[in-house]
């Protein structure tokens, strides 16, 4: 936290399911004497117990989740509270009315969501506007040089509706740290060795990954920056992206990631990364791309 604040970073993200709530408790201890210098983001919705109400975004579940998060964090307000996922079993009106009440009560400053589909987000924004409730201003979503699905629908929606992208796993679940090389085994400490990455994380073909890594290496030689710094810098220049969530194992890794700011890739370097990381679009996006006169790629 000291390193981040020294570098001008002040948003710290957590969730109720991270280490069974311990992550929020540790974060709360770290901010105890500098609450006014930081922004706290946390999340709820995923299952965190065996009870029938220990999951979801119902009124009961959200009020309890926020009160428990405030207690673990040792604060009386959350700067950005996000739904960790969409709850299709609860009407969006119930969820949004509850969140609006929590904002009115002063327990939450701003609202966001995470891992929503385009229609999930648009339905929620429309309902909030219709009733005059607080709208989502942030969408915490996966986006990286080896995972560009965000661009197809969520990016244009974000620009149209004024929703900032809060990007998680910007290094593609550890694939773009500079430690993975063609024909070499995974490092033992790689995040990709985890069962979560193998079973539930985004899947990336070796051809795409190593073609992107080769291009990152080329640009690293041109700029003197690391592979990770280039991958992060590319994201920071993308339309609708407000901030990146980085999770560093140690101070050295954190300081390397912080080196992604304060400079910019040239348009030619960014275009080279665009080309090598592009994948065939699914329908209807490939069809819309053929009508670029009226469906242009989003620009910030």
Image: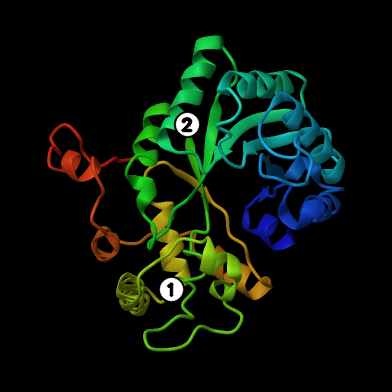
Q: How crowded is mark 1: few (under 14 residues within 10 Å), some or many (20 or more)?
A: many
Describe residue 201's horizontal placement relative to residue 284 as left or right: right
Q: Position of residue 273 (x, y in %)?
A: 29, 64
Residue that label 2 marks: 121
* Towards the viewer: 117 or 190: 117
Q: Where is residue 125 in the image (x, y as percent from the top left)?
A: 49, 23
In the picture, the disc for residue 21 is none
Query: Relative to residue 239, is residue 175 depicted above or below?
Result: below
Residue drawn where x is 37% and y is 76% of the image: 220
Residue drawn where x is 13% and y is 37% of the image: 291
Q: Rounded to the nearest whole Å, what is the CA distance between mark 1 and mark 2? A: 33 Å
Residue drawn where x is 74% and y is 36% of the image: 78
Q: Position of residue 112 (x, y in %)?
A: 58, 35
Describe residue 157's horizontal placement relative to residue 67 as left or right: left
Query: Relative to residue 87, is residue 254 depicted above or below?
Result: below
Query: Which type of secondary structure does the marked residue at label 1 adopt?
Result: helix
Residue 294 visible from this viewpoint: yes
Residue drawn where x is 38% and y is 63% of the image: 146
Query: Which type of secondary structure does the marked residue at label 2 adopt?
Result: helix
Residue that label 1 marks: 227
């Amino acid at each position: 936290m000291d390193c981040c604040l020294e570098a001008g970073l002040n948003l710290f993200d957590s969730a109720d399911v991270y280490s069974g709530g311990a992550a929020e408790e540790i974060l709360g201890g770290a901010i105890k004497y500098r609450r006014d210098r930081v922004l706290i983001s946390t999340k709820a919705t995923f299952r965190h117990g065996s009870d029938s109400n220990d999951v979801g975004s119902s009124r009961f579940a959200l009020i309890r989740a926020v009160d428990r998060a405030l207690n673990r964090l040792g604060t009386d307000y959350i700067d950005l509270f996000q739904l960790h996922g969409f709850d299709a079993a609860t009407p969006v009106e119930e969820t949004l009315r509850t969140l609006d009440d929590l904002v009115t009560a002063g327990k939450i400053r701003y609202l966001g969501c995470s891992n929503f589909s385009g229609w999930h987000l648009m339905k929620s924004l429309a309902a909030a506007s219709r009733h005059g409730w607080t709208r989502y201003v942030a969408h915490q979503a996966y986006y990286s040089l080896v995972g560009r699905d965000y661009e197809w629908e969520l990016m244009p929606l974000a620009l149209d509706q004024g929703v900032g992208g809060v990007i998680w796993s910007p290094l593609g679940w550890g694939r773009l740290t500079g430690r993975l090389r063609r024909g070499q085994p995974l490092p033992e400490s790689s995040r990709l060795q985890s069962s979560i990455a193998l079973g539930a994380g985004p899947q990336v073909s070796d051809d795409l990954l190593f073609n992107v890594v080769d291009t990152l290496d080329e640009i690293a030689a041109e700029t003197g920056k690391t592979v990770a710094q280039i991958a992060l810098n590319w994201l920071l220049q993308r339309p609708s992206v407000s901030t990146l969530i980085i999770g560093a194992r140690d101070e050295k890794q954190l300081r390397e990631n912080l080196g992604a700011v304060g400079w910019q890739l040239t348009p030619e370097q960014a275009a080279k990364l665009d080309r090598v990381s592009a994948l065939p679009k699914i329908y209807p996006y490939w069809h819309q791309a053929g009508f670029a006169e009226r469906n242009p790629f989003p620009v910030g």
